[in-house]
Image (cartoon, helix red, strand yellow):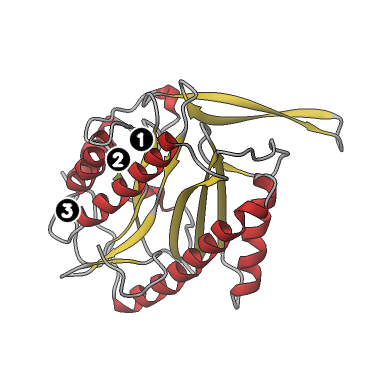
Amino acid sequence: MSAAPYTANESDLARFRATGRWAADALRHARQGLAACEDAVQLAALIKRHIRCMMPAQPRWLSVGIGVNERYLNHVWYSPAPFRAGDLVTIEVGLDVAGYYTETAETVAWGTPSRCDRELIEAAGAALAAGIRAAMAGSRVRNISSAIESAVVDRGFRVSMFGAGHAIRVDSAAMDNRSAPLIPNSVAIRPRPNHGNRWSGEDLETSWGTRLDPGMCLALEPLVNGGTAEVQQGLESVELTEIGGRLHLPFRQTADGAKTAKFAHTVYLLADRTAVLTAGDDDAAG
């Protein structure tokens, strides 16, 4: 059984393109300014300032996620550890403008990466490219999942058991598109409570069978681990001096402490090609 498709029209495509260009520009600005940032808080602030300056109107919703080394993305507002030479920093930007949502992500090194870290980054980038090539009208989600997984495994790495891409719907009210079909990064993944994923086995089977139709918008988000695919939860203890207490914030990280990398693009399916909305080029296609 296939999940209901979320298709858009040509007018929607133009609005998706505009949002995608803004998201791509924000990520490019973050990449260029990373070396001057001392920590994740500074980097997140850099992105938000850039978006406020470049956009004629503020987005309905802005998501800036920063992950460092073994940690997956967090919404940054507490005091993190300073960046150190060789850290792998994952930057994700999600923008919702009038119901048209796009997201993009990239992992980059703060300083010079080791050979293994460079290969991990390359594997995540290759997985995204493979997923885009497989995202074609007339195909199915399972083909995207298989292509991503093969690109990762062929390079000696593991697809993380945490996280997945998703279809995007045009919606003037809801900002959370996660109710749309999933785009799993593997055809072997199974839901496990300790991974913090919100889907069930039935969700996965339904999503894998979803037919890809022209007009669908998809966020592809390969997440690659340098060691085990397993994930564990940690707690960040944050002191709140203004109230004299502490707050314990949960986060996800690789179970063995190995580094992780993520790349993401938002794509739009046309009858004869796939447009990459967050590549910063209207003509970019897989």
Report how far apart the C-alphas of labels 2 and 1 lie in the structure. Answer: 13 Å
Contact between marks 2 and 1 (CB within 8 A): the answer is no
Marks 3 and 1, how far apart in space? 19 Å
- The percent coordinates of residue 62 (x first, y second) are 57, 58
Tags 2 and 3 in contact by the CB under 8 Å rule? no
State the image coordinates of residue 21 (x, y, percent, origin top left). 45, 70
Read off the residue under disc 3: 211
Residue located farthest toward the left when viewing the structure as drawn? 138
10 Å crowding of disc 1: few (<14), some (14-19), many (20+): some
Q: Earlier in the sequence, mark 2 or mark 1?
A: 2
| Residue 131: image tag | none
Q: Position of residue 142 (x, y in %)?
A: 19, 44
Work out whether 74 lies above or below 282: above
Q: Gap between marks 2 and 3, in whole Å?
A: 16 Å
Q: Are marks 3 and 1 in contact (CB under 8 Å)?
A: no
**Residue 166 at x, y percent in the picture:** 34, 49
Determine which residue is flagged by label 1.
Answer: 199
The kind of residue tagged 1 is: Trp
Q: Tell me the SS state at disc 3.
A: loop
Residue at disc 1, secondary structure: loop
- Residue placed at 44% from the left, 57% from the top? 103
**Mark 2 vs 3, N-terminal side:** 2
In which quadrant will I find the N terminus? top left
**Residue ID at (57%, 45%):** 111
Residue tagged 2: 185
